[in-house]
Image: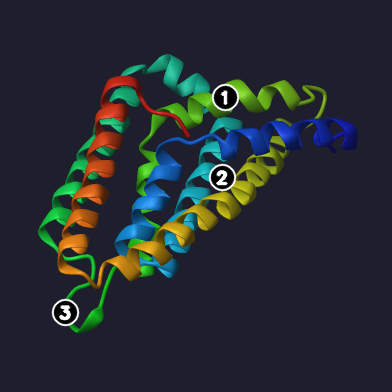
Amino acid sequence: MIDPLLYLAFLPAALALVLTPGPDMLFAMAQGLRGGRMPAIAAAAGISVGAFTNAALAGLGMGALVAAAPWLFGVIRWVGVAYLVWLAIKTLRNPLIGEHGRSVRPSRAFRDGLVVNLSNPSVILFILAFIPQFVDPAQPILPQFLIYGGTIAALGFVVKSLVGISAGGLGRRLARNPRIERALRWTTASIFGALAARVALTGGRA
Protein backbone atom coordinates (compact mmCIF):
# COMPACT_ATOMS: atom_id res chain seq x y z
CA MET A 1 0.00 0.00 0.00
CA ILE A 2 2.88 2.36 0.78
CA ASP A 3 5.58 3.03 -1.81
CA PRO A 4 8.80 1.50 -0.39
CA LEU A 5 10.86 4.47 -1.62
CA LEU A 6 8.48 6.89 0.08
CA TYR A 7 8.73 4.88 3.29
CA LEU A 8 12.52 4.93 3.10
CA ALA A 9 12.34 8.72 2.80
CA PHE A 10 10.03 8.81 5.82
CA LEU A 11 12.34 6.79 8.12
CA PRO A 12 15.20 9.33 8.53
CA ALA A 13 12.67 12.13 9.02
CA ALA A 14 10.86 10.11 11.70
CA LEU A 15 14.17 9.21 13.39
CA ALA A 16 15.18 12.88 13.47
CA LEU A 17 11.80 13.63 15.05
CA VAL A 18 12.12 11.13 17.89
CA LEU A 19 15.76 12.09 18.55
CA THR A 20 14.80 15.74 19.08
CA PRO A 21 14.63 16.47 22.83
CA GLY A 22 11.13 17.40 23.93
CA PRO A 23 8.59 16.88 26.72
CA ASP A 24 8.19 13.15 26.07
CA MET A 25 11.93 12.50 26.22
CA LEU A 26 12.27 14.60 29.38
CA PHE A 27 9.36 12.73 30.92
CA ALA A 28 10.99 9.35 30.22
CA MET A 29 14.22 10.64 31.73
CA ALA A 30 12.36 11.89 34.82
CA GLN A 31 10.66 8.53 35.29
CA GLY A 32 14.03 6.82 35.03
CA LEU A 33 15.47 9.09 37.71
CA ARG A 34 12.40 8.57 39.86
CA GLY A 35 11.91 4.81 39.53
CA GLY A 36 14.73 3.13 37.65
CA ARG A 37 14.88 0.91 34.59
CA MET A 38 11.46 -0.75 34.44
CA PRO A 39 9.40 2.39 35.09
CA ALA A 40 11.45 4.18 32.43
CA ILE A 41 10.68 1.47 29.87
CA ALA A 42 7.02 1.45 30.90
CA ALA A 43 6.82 5.23 30.57
CA ALA A 44 8.36 5.02 27.08
CA ALA A 45 5.77 2.36 26.18
CA GLY A 46 2.94 4.59 27.42
CA ILE A 47 4.28 7.51 25.39
CA SER A 48 4.50 5.30 22.28
CA VAL A 49 0.95 4.01 22.70
CA GLY A 50 -0.17 7.62 23.03
CA ALA A 51 1.68 8.59 19.85
CA PHE A 52 0.10 5.70 17.94
CA THR A 53 -3.33 6.65 19.29
CA ASN A 54 -2.80 10.24 18.15
CA ALA A 55 -1.87 8.99 14.67
CA ALA A 56 -5.02 6.86 14.56
CA LEU A 57 -7.16 9.83 15.67
CA ALA A 58 -5.53 12.00 13.03
CA GLY A 59 -6.25 9.38 10.38
CA LEU A 60 -9.87 9.20 11.56
CA GLY A 61 -10.34 12.93 11.12
CA MET A 62 -9.41 14.55 14.41
CA GLY A 63 -8.20 17.56 12.43
CA ALA A 64 -11.72 18.20 11.15
CA LEU A 65 -13.15 17.83 14.67
CA VAL A 66 -10.70 20.32 16.14
CA ALA A 67 -11.38 22.77 13.32
CA ALA A 68 -15.07 22.58 14.21
CA ALA A 69 -14.41 22.88 17.99
CA PRO A 70 -11.12 24.77 18.58
CA TRP A 71 -11.76 24.88 22.33
CA LEU A 72 -11.20 21.12 22.49
CA PHE A 73 -7.42 21.42 22.36
CA GLY A 74 -7.50 24.01 25.13
CA VAL A 75 -9.34 21.61 27.42
CA ILE A 76 -6.92 18.78 26.60
CA ARG A 77 -3.91 21.01 27.20
CA TRP A 78 -5.04 22.18 30.65
CA VAL A 79 -5.83 18.63 31.72
CA GLY A 80 -2.23 17.76 30.85
CA VAL A 81 -0.89 20.79 32.72
CA ALA A 82 -2.83 19.83 35.86
CA TYR A 83 -1.60 16.23 35.64
CA LEU A 84 2.05 17.29 35.33
CA VAL A 85 1.73 19.67 38.28
CA TRP A 86 0.23 16.84 40.33
CA LEU A 87 3.15 14.58 39.40
CA ALA A 88 5.63 17.31 40.43
CA ILE A 89 3.96 17.74 43.83
CA LYS A 90 3.75 13.99 44.37
CA THR A 91 7.44 13.57 43.53
CA LEU A 92 8.43 16.25 46.03
CA ARG A 93 6.37 14.69 48.81
CA ASN A 94 7.49 11.08 48.33
CA PRO A 95 11.02 9.60 48.38
CA LEU A 96 12.26 8.20 45.08
CA ILE A 97 12.57 4.85 46.87
CA GLY A 98 9.83 4.30 49.40
CA GLU A 99 9.44 1.97 52.33
CA HIS A 100 10.79 -1.56 51.90
CA GLY A 101 12.67 -0.42 48.77
CA ARG A 102 9.54 -0.01 46.66
CA SER A 103 9.54 2.63 43.93
CA VAL A 104 7.33 3.65 40.99
CA ARG A 105 5.20 0.80 39.65
CA PRO A 106 5.69 0.19 35.91
CA SER A 107 1.91 0.15 35.42
CA ARG A 108 1.68 3.64 36.89
CA ALA A 109 4.63 4.85 34.81
CA PHE A 110 2.90 3.49 31.69
CA ARG A 111 -0.33 5.28 32.60
CA ASP A 112 1.48 8.54 33.29
CA GLY A 113 3.35 8.38 29.99
CA LEU A 114 0.13 7.69 28.12
CA VAL A 115 -1.74 10.56 29.78
CA VAL A 116 1.11 13.03 29.28
CA ASN A 117 1.34 12.21 25.57
CA LEU A 118 -2.40 12.23 24.91
CA SER A 119 -2.86 15.50 26.80
CA ASN A 120 -0.20 17.30 24.75
CA PRO A 121 -2.24 18.71 21.83
CA SER A 122 0.84 19.66 19.84
CA VAL A 123 1.57 15.95 19.30
CA ILE A 124 -1.51 15.43 17.17
CA LEU A 125 -1.00 18.83 15.51
CA PHE A 126 2.52 17.80 14.54
CA ILE A 127 1.26 14.44 13.26
CA LEU A 128 -1.38 16.23 11.20
CA ALA A 129 1.35 18.38 9.66
CA PHE A 130 4.06 15.72 9.30
CA ILE A 131 2.50 12.44 8.20
CA PRO A 132 0.32 13.81 5.34
CA GLN A 133 3.51 14.72 3.47
CA PHE A 134 4.07 10.97 2.98
CA VAL A 135 0.44 9.93 2.41
CA ASP A 136 -0.81 8.90 -1.03
CA PRO A 137 -4.35 10.35 -1.31
CA ALA A 138 -5.19 7.73 -3.94
CA GLN A 139 -4.83 5.00 -1.30
CA PRO A 140 -6.89 4.44 1.90
CA ILE A 141 -5.82 7.16 4.36
CA LEU A 142 -6.24 5.49 7.76
CA PRO A 143 -3.97 2.45 7.11
CA GLN A 144 -1.21 4.80 5.97
CA PHE A 145 -1.54 6.90 9.13
CA LEU A 146 -1.40 3.72 11.20
CA ILE A 147 1.76 2.49 9.48
CA TYR A 148 3.56 5.81 9.75
CA GLY A 149 2.28 6.39 13.29
CA GLY A 150 3.33 2.89 14.32
CA THR A 151 6.82 3.57 12.95
CA ILE A 152 7.12 6.80 14.93
CA ALA A 153 5.85 5.00 18.05
CA ALA A 154 8.34 2.13 17.66
CA LEU A 155 11.32 4.41 17.06
CA GLY A 156 10.25 6.64 19.93
CA PHE A 157 9.97 3.67 22.27
CA VAL A 158 13.55 2.60 21.58
CA VAL A 159 15.01 6.09 21.95
CA LYS A 160 13.04 7.10 25.04
CA SER A 161 13.66 3.72 26.71
CA LEU A 162 17.40 4.16 26.28
CA VAL A 163 17.25 7.70 27.67
CA GLY A 164 15.16 6.58 30.64
CA ILE A 165 17.33 3.52 31.36
CA SER A 166 20.49 5.65 31.32
CA ALA A 167 18.94 8.15 33.73
CA GLY A 168 17.53 5.33 35.86
CA GLY A 169 20.84 3.58 36.33
CA LEU A 170 22.45 6.78 37.52
CA GLY A 171 19.49 7.79 39.66
CA ARG A 172 19.21 4.47 41.51
CA ARG A 173 22.89 4.57 42.45
CA LEU A 174 22.77 8.17 43.63
CA ALA A 175 19.48 7.73 45.51
CA ARG A 176 21.28 5.70 48.22
CA ASN A 177 22.66 9.00 49.52
CA PRO A 178 19.89 10.95 51.34
CA ARG A 179 21.15 14.36 50.24
CA ILE A 180 21.53 13.28 46.64
CA GLU A 181 18.14 11.55 46.78
CA ARG A 182 16.57 14.82 47.89
CA ALA A 183 18.33 16.69 45.07
CA LEU A 184 17.11 14.09 42.56
CA ARG A 185 13.55 14.52 43.81
CA TRP A 186 13.77 18.27 43.30
CA THR A 187 15.34 17.76 39.87
CA THR A 188 12.62 15.33 38.80
CA ALA A 189 9.84 17.53 40.19
CA SER A 190 11.39 20.52 38.42
CA ILE A 191 11.30 18.64 35.11
CA PHE A 192 7.61 17.87 35.60
CA GLY A 193 6.96 21.51 36.56
CA ALA A 194 8.89 22.82 33.56
CA LEU A 195 6.94 20.50 31.26
CA ALA A 196 3.68 21.79 32.75
CA ALA A 197 4.77 25.39 32.14
CA ARG A 198 5.84 24.62 28.59
CA VAL A 199 2.59 22.87 27.71
CA ALA A 200 0.60 25.69 29.33
CA LEU A 201 2.44 28.42 27.45
CA THR A 202 3.13 26.83 24.08
CA GLY A 203 1.39 23.47 23.86
CA GLY A 204 4.79 21.72 24.01
CA ARG A 205 6.26 19.39 21.42
CA ALA A 206 6.57 15.65 21.03
Residue at label 2?
A: 52
Residue 150: mark in rendering: none
Amino acid marked by disc 1: Leu
- Look at the numbered disc 3 and give the secondary structure of its residue: helix
Amino acid marked by disc 2: Phe
Name above or below for residue 135 compared with residue 35.
above
Q: Nearer the viewer, residue 82 or 157?
A: 157
Q: Is residue 40 left or right of residue 87?
A: right
Depth-wise, is mark 3 or mark 2 nearer the camera? 3
How many labels were placed on the picture? 3
- What residue is at 10 percent from the left and 58 percent from the top? 93
Looking at marks 2 and 1 on the same chain, the residue that comes earlier in the sequence is marked by 2
Q: Nearer the viewer, residue 188 or 134?
A: 188
Residue 99: mark in rendering: 3
Q: Nearer the viewer, residue 68 or 4?
A: 4
> As drawn, which residue projects farthest toward the left?
93
> As drawn, which residue projects farthest toward the bottom?
100
Quadrant of the snapshot with the N terminus: top right
Assess disc 2: are there few (<14), some (14-19) or many (≥20) residues with their C-alpha within 10 Å of its C-alpha: many
Depth-wise, is mark 3 or mark 1 nearer the camera? 3
Amino acid marked by disc 3: Glu
- Look at the numbered disc 1 and give the secondary structure of its residue: helix
Residue at label 1?
A: 128
Which of the 4 image quarters holds residue 100?
A: bottom left
Looking at marks 3 and 1 on the same chain, the residue that comes earlier in the sequence is marked by 3
Q: CA distance from mark 3 to mark 2?
A: 36 Å
Name above or below for residue 198 compared with residue 95.
above
